[in-house]
């Protein structure tokens, strides 16, 4: 039970000096409503309500019943938790050990109206005083509710502490005090109390419906708050003789960089900055941390207090040790101007000491690279930290995960929880070679929710990859051989063989070979890549298989077709079913070309002189008989050297001008194009010979950029005799 709420049989001590037990006070509450202003300080359940004369009797009855219920729940509350201005929960510990949560709130009932509803939720075996606001809100979301007043414009809830100071509840459920000056007859403890004593719920009437234009419905309840210290049977009289420091306001709380144990690379302390607390002389003040979560008994988080005396100025900064990583609680400052004074000023705020980032390290086991080792540094001194080991975006299939308790969360992470700071993940054999697995590590305190509803219960998630090094797949590095297959057209039978691959697969794997062939990708129109082979021998563990590739397997599409033979290899695992491949070195094998027909001599005489030598004979172009000289240009040529039309194989065309080699009478050689006219001066009285040979022509293949050259056989020679003129 919350120490700020007195047990129901406990004596209430009020500031007006009156005392009474709660049961005595409750007797005749409704009877005494007419004199409420006289005994208001003793009433622990009061209601007022109003409605217009036009409101129905049913609505009036509902409102009266609601007022009685609201006041009764406030009177019996062990704890009150608000959420904004539209929701309040009264927590009550039942005799059977349940925590009963009764919640009043407005829920949307249309485009512009709300219904005031009352919900209830029971949590078995739970101490109401230990529930955080976030846990209360979670329970309320699933409570059983019923309507109280329907179709109102708004529900507005307000709070006051034991001395009437306004309280507000933000949406995180942590009470905050309104600004104000402490009256002289009010103690600091009462003035700073965060426990609501008076709760007021007021509705704004709707413009239509059963209570249209009615006056607001007002429900008021008072809780039995007693502020420590309590002096039984006596009035706590404020000490107004000593001066009081100026109002304190805590402006900032952050992690200390100077005080506190060094854990996880950070200090387990807080730096508190506040203004006020100023006295004429020294101020006597304490800075305190009161743990709220994790539970002190479970996690060993204890209260931490530092006491000071100093002459304060506008802003004061003090460091407070003893706030472990992951702890949440109230930071408070209380100050007096006299070390013995009971009156002073104070302020408090909620603070969460966040968990430090876990800069974990990674490794693979040298003896077994598929075992990944994660080492996590200590991040807490006072609580048992748990670790979420995450396999992120890049990971193996779930059936291979080490450990059995993997779970899946958004955004598609697989994870498991452990309390070990050294985690070894033994992936199955042959599953993660060369795979960069994306791991993340997040630390958290199990079962912990901070009282202020924050989500800083975990460390940041730090991701990095752990990679099992890839192994080298044995490869066929020596030449692949192809024998046979020299035919010019199909069938293009032959034998393919290859040497053993160099290297070995990891233990437990087997080596496989894959022979296949494909066409040169530069060939047009038949462009085929290695992934779409023209022939595929399949995978085998044997060498030189198959021994023969038959002509039916070879697709000869055109002469001089290029075939690339290749043998790729792989290491296969029978455990994981995975395989790792290595491409081979292709060997280029071309089909043959049909032989071309030799060209024949078709040269002719072209005598340019006026004399008429013997027909079909070739004469010297000069009549010199060895005594008269002349120039070739004066007489022209005597022979036009030519061969029959060049013969190109099917699928090709003549490219360029054919050529030939000429051996002159003096033995010198020259090259000339077919159809060239020429003549010789031999001199002397005897004839000389000239040879024409090496007739050569080129053919452009239509399916590629290749140009093939054909030449007459070496024994195809045309010899002419050059005679002197008569």
Image (spheres, rainbow, N blue to C red):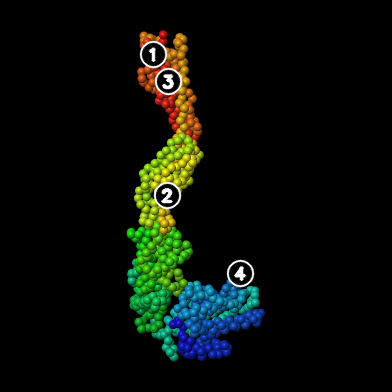
Taking 397 as reference, is 237 above or below it? below
The location of residue 473, given as percent across then percent down, is 38, 51
The location of residue 139, given as percent across then percent down, is 51, 75
The answer to whether residue 157 of the structure is visible from this angle is no
Q: Pointer 4 and pointer 2: residues touching (CB < 8 Å)?
A: no
Q: CA distance from mark 1 to mark 4?
A: 126 Å
Q: CA distance from mark 3 to mark 1?
A: 16 Å
Quarter of the rendering containing residue 64: bottom right
Which of 634/255 is in front? 634
Q: CA distance from mark 4 to mark 2?
A: 74 Å
Q: Give the structural element (helix, strand or loop) at label 3.
A: strand
Residue that label 3 marks: 718
Q: Quadrant of the C terminus?
A: top left
Which residue lies most toward the front here? 547
Residue that label 1 marks: 687
Query: Residue sitting at 46 percent across and 32 percent down?
Result: 594
Q: Pointer 4 and pointer 3: residues touching (CB < 8 Å)?
A: no
Q: Quadrant of the N terminus?
A: bottom left
Residue that label 2 marks: 540
Q: Give the structural element (helix, strand or loop) at label 2.
A: loop
The answer to whether residue 474 of the structure is visible from this angle is yes
Q: CA distance from mark 4 to mark 3?
A: 112 Å
> Mark 4 vs mark 3: which is more N-terminal?
4
> Mark 4 vs mark 2: which is more N-terminal?
4
**Counting other residues with Cα less than 10 Å from the Cα at mark 3, is it few (<14), some (14-19), or many (20 or more)?**
some
Q: Pointer 2 and pointer 1: residues touching (CB < 8 Å)?
A: no
């Amino acid at each position: 039970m919350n120490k700020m709420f007195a047990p129901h049989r406990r004596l209430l001590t009020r500031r007006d000096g009156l005392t009474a037990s709660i049961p005595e006070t409750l007797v005749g509450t409704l009877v005494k409503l007419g004199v409420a202003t006289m005994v208001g300080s003793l009433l622990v359940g009061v209601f007022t309500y109003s409605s217009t004369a036009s409101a129905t009797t049913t609505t009036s009855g509902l409102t009266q019943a609601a007022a009685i219920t609201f006041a009764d729940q406030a009177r019996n509350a062990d704890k009150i938790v608000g959420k904004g201005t539209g929701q309040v929960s009264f927590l009550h510990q039942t005799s059977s050990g349940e925590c009963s949560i009764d919640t009043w709130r407005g829920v949307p009932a249309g485009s512009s109206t709300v219904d005031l509803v009352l919900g209830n939720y029971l949590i078995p075996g739970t101490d109401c005083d230990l529930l955080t606001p976030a846990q209360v809100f979670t329970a309320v979301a699933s409570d059983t509710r019923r309507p109280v007043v329907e179709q109102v414009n708004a529900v507005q809830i307000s709070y006051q502490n034991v001395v009437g100071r306004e309280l507000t509840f933000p949406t995180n459920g942590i009470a905050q005090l309104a600004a104000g000056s402490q009256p002289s007859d009010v103690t600091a403890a009462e003035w700073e109390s965060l426990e609501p004593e008076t709760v007021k719920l007021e509705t704004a009437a709707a413009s239509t419906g059963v209570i249209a234009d009615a006056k607001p419905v007002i429900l008021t309840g008072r809780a039995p708050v007693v502020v420590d210290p309590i002096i039984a049977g006596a009035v706590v009289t404020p000490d107004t003789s000593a001066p009081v420091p100026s109002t304190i306001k805590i402006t900032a709380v952050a992690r200390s960089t100077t005080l506190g144990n060094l854990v996880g690379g950070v200090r387990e302390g807080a730096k508190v900055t506040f203004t006020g607390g100023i006295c004429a002389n020294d101020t006597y003040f304490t800075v305190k941390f009161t743990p709220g979560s994790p539970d002190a008994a479970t996690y060993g988080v204890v209260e931490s207090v530092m006491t000071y005396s100093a002459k304060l100025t506008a802003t004061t900064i003090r460091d407070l040790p003893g706030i472990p990583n992951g702890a949440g609680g109230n930071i408070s400052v209380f100050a007096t101007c006299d070390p013995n004074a009971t009156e002073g000023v104070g302020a408090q705020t909620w603070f969460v000491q966040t968990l430090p980032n876990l800069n974990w390290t990674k490794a693979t086991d040298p003896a077994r690279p598929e075992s990944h080792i994660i080492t996590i540094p200590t991040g807490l001194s006072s609580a048992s930290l748990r670790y979420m080991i995450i396999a992120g975006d890049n990971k193996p299939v779930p059936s291979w995960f080490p450990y059995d308790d993997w779970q899946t969360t958004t955004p598609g992470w697989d994870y498991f929880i452990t309390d070990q700071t050294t985690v070894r993940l033994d992936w199955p054999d042959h599953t993660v070679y060369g795979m960069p697995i994306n791991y993340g590590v997040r630390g958290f305190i199990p079962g912990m929710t901070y009282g202020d509803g924050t989500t800083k219960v975990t460390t940041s998630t730090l991701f990095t990859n752990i990679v099992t090094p890839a192994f080298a797949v044995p490869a066929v590095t020596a030449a692949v051989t192809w024998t046979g297959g020299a035919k010019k057209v199909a069938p293009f039978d032959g034998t393919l063989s290859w040497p053993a691959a160099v290297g070995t697969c990891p233990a437990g794997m087997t080596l496989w070979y894959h022979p296949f062939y494909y066409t040169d990708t530069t060939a047009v129109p038949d462009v085929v890549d290695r992934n779409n082979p023209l022939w595929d021998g399949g995978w085998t563990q044997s060498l030189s298989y198959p021994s023969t590739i038959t002509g039916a397997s070879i697709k000869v599409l055109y002469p001089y077709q290029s075939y690339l033979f290749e043998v790729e290899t792989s290491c296969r695992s029978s455990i994981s079913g995975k395989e790792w491949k290595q491409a081979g070195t292709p060997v280029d094998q071309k089909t043959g070309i049909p032989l071309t027909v030799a060209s024949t001599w078709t040269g002719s005489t072209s005598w340019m002189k006026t004399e008429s030598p013997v027909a079909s004979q070739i004469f010297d172009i000069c009549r010199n008989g060895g005594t008269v000289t002349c120039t070739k240009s004066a007489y022209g040529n005597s022979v036009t050297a030519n061969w029959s039309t060049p013969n190109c194989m099917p699928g090709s065309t003549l490219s360029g001008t054919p050529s030939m080699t000429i051996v002159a009478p003096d033995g010198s050689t020259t090259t000339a194009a077919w159809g060239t006219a020429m003549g010789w001066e031999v001199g002397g009285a005897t004839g000389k010979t000239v040879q024409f040979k090496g007739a050569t022509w080129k053919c452009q293949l239509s399916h590629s950029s290749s140009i093939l050259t054909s030449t007459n056989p070496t024994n195809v020679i045309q010899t002419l005799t050059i005679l002197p003129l008569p």
